[in-house]
Image (cartoon, rainbow, N blue to C red):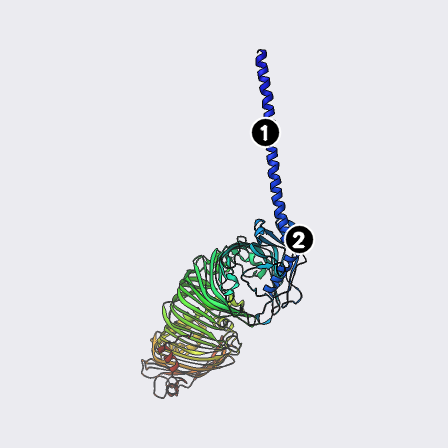
Amino acid sequence: MGKKEYKKKRCWRLRSARYFKRSLFWALRVLLLLLMVLLFFVCSVWLLFVKNFNAQRISELITEELQKRLDRPVAISSMELTFVNTVELKGFLILDTLGNPGSPLVSADTVTLHFKLLPLLERQLVIDEVVFKSPRFNVVRLGEGVNNIPHLKHTENAVYTRGTTGPKWTVGVEDWTVQNGVLSYQDKVTEVTHAIYGFNLHLERLRFDELSHFTLDMVLRNQWENGISDMEIEGKGQVDFADFNWEKFALRDLRAKVFLFQNPIELTIDVDNLRTPYFNVRAQVPAFTDKQLSVFHLEKTPFSMPKSEVTAKGVLDKNYHLLKVNQWTASVADVKVEGKGQVDFNAQPFSADFQFSTNWFNLAGKQSYYAPLSKYHLQGKGQAEGRIARASGEYSLPLLALRAKETKGSFYGFETENITGEFRAKNNFSDLYASVQQGKVTVSKSVFDKVNLSASWRKGNLYAYIAGAELNEVPIKINTTIENLKSNHRKIHSNLYFKHFDPMAFIATVQDFVEVITPLTKSTSSKPVVAGDLAWLRNFRDRLPGFMPNFSGTIQADTFSSQVLSGNQFNGEFDLTGLNAGMDRLSGKIEARLQEGIIHQMEKLAEEQQALNITFQPFIIMHRMERAGSFKVGKVLKDVPFTEMAVSTSFENGRMQINNAYTVGSSISAAISGWVDWVHENFDMIIWTMFSNTSRSGALAENLTDESGNPALAFRVSSSMLKPKVEMQRAKKTGATIRAAQAKGLQTDFKAAQDFVQGDFHAKK
């Protein structure tokens, strides 16, 4: 490189450096000038603001304005300009004059106002945001529903004047914020207190004559007996204060989350008219269990509720003292509940009355919500309706109606199938009604099918009617009345009709009921089951039910059959007291009649059963005489027909007096008198028996005929049932005795039983 080229490059570098320094110097001068202009502007604005903004005067104006609007004493300790656009009110206080006079109604350590600077040049104080830091609001409810909340008085424009002739200032507020506030509520009538903690509220561009957006969150604390529950709430929505015309107030689309369970309850709320608020609430309730409601002490009623949806529409009337819910719904899985009702807070304590009804829903699977239902094995469909009320501090159930359609279940040993019916409970279950239009009920081995049943419970009395059914495929009809059911002196009256009556089968059915009911009553037999002679009597006597101290009624059957007898048109009437285990207090009467029947296989049955051996003694004796060649009675010891058989007895302390008993037939006629002591197992009876003349020789001994010459036998059976004594009696008056017994007849014509069969009885709703 030559010297000339080197000098040129060096000169260029020096010129470039000098140019860069000059440019940087001029840029710094321009920036400094701009900063000086800006500082001058800020200082001018600040001086103008300080000149016109008198903190003490503004504090006085705000205090006066609040007192004018709230009609309550207002105090502000001081007002400071903490930043170029921030004012802080300290010692803010609104005093209460009604609830707790002299105590704070609203208090806050500081109230911060953030305002805009430029509008100050036009004497406008535009507050971007008013922030209440840690305020406390104390609401008190006095008697007759009066509270200490002031009525806010609205003025058209907020205009303030400095002095009497000073310049006018207009004040406007954009946003309002409450940070970490506390709202307490005290009811001096009921001594109930509630509190909201951590209350945060932000009102965005609040306008008092149009909808404005807001957000909020808080913690609601309640005391339930000895428990305290905290409930977190957060939400957002729109509010229109309608220039403080509370009748036009509107709260729109408030969407809130209430953290009561593991997942929040999502609410959507609309409210109109704060004078008489109309509300519309929709809630999405998450699944929850009883453990999440432990504050209500529901430990004894475990349940698990699935996700549900609840809506309610209503109004708060009479100065917030009457809550009317015009319509509410709740949807839980396939169950939808609808209702309406009201709560009256004027009553002390408050009163309530709500009605509800459900759709038809499936019963299967509901044990997953309420575990105790699993033992019923429910299937089919159900529906419910009812009414819940509260008065004088007590809750009541004026009405509960449950309906079933083609249901199946197991209820304490009673197996049901295809049941369609209804159950009604009134006045806290003091008045009950139930009906079954069709269905099948199995009690151990007894099956009731095609059941048409109705029953009611009123004033301590039970009325039950089976207008039609089949018991083990036999048509039946029953009504039963139990007076003073809860008393040890209750009275039971029952009418029974059987198309076909088998006493042994009926006793088996009674035993089936005993087997099912006994475990429910947690009672056991006082004596063990015995076997051997007279076991039938002893087991029956020791197990008579104690719940029938007074038992009366009728029984009728078109046909009758047993191992001993069969016939048509069976009628019976009974009126017994002391019918309980031991039979030692059994008293009363039994009347019975059977027509057009047959006495079966006397000889065979007499050999098999001791009791029948006693009863059939005359026939056994006749049989022995036949073997001796006296006369032929073979037909008598087989199936013997009769025209009529009747018995009239009375009981006293377990001893049965035979008032009249007779049998009339073409082959055999008989009459019986005497007594039987079922408790001490002894008896004393005289039996007169007359036969048709079947003598091969045509003549009988005198002691074997009555005055007509027909074969006859009279004998006395007495002493112990296990070792009876048999004494022959004179038979001359046998025919006359039998005719007299037949003429005497019974003490009833069984009209009550016949009227029952012809009638159509149903319980009243």
Q: CA distance from mark 1 to mark 2?
A: 46 Å
Tell me: 760 left or right of 16.
left
Residue 556 occupies which quadrant of the picture?
A: bottom left
Tell me: 203 left or right of 446.
right
| Amino acid marked by disc 2 | Glu
Tell me: 762 left or right of 152.
left
Q: Nearer the viewer, residue 88 or 614?
A: 88
Label 1, secondary structure: give it: helix
- Residue plotted at (60% across, 24% down): 17
Q: Position of residue 230 (x, y in %)?
A: 59, 57
How many neighbours does mark 2 have within 10 angstroms: few (below 14), some (14-19), or many (20 or more)? some
Q: How many marks?
A: 2
Q: Indicate which disc residue 80 carries.
A: 2
Q: Nearer the viewer, residue 605 or 754?
A: 754
| Amino acid marked by disc 1 | Ser
Q: Indicate which disc residue 23 carries.
A: 1
Quarter occupied by the C terminus? bottom left
Which residue ends up furthest to the top in the rendered image? 2
Q: Quick check: marks 1 and 2 in contact, CB under 8 Å?
A: no
Q: Is residue 255 visible?
A: no
Q: Is residue 508 above or below residue 125?
A: below
Q: Position of residue 8 (x, y in %)?
A: 57, 16
Q: Nearer the viewer, residue 742 or 355?
A: 355
Residue 198 occupies which quadrant of the picture?
A: bottom right
Callout in the foreground (1, 2): 1
Mark before the other along the chain sequence, 1 or 2: 1
Q: Position of residue 562 (x, y in %)?
A: 39, 72
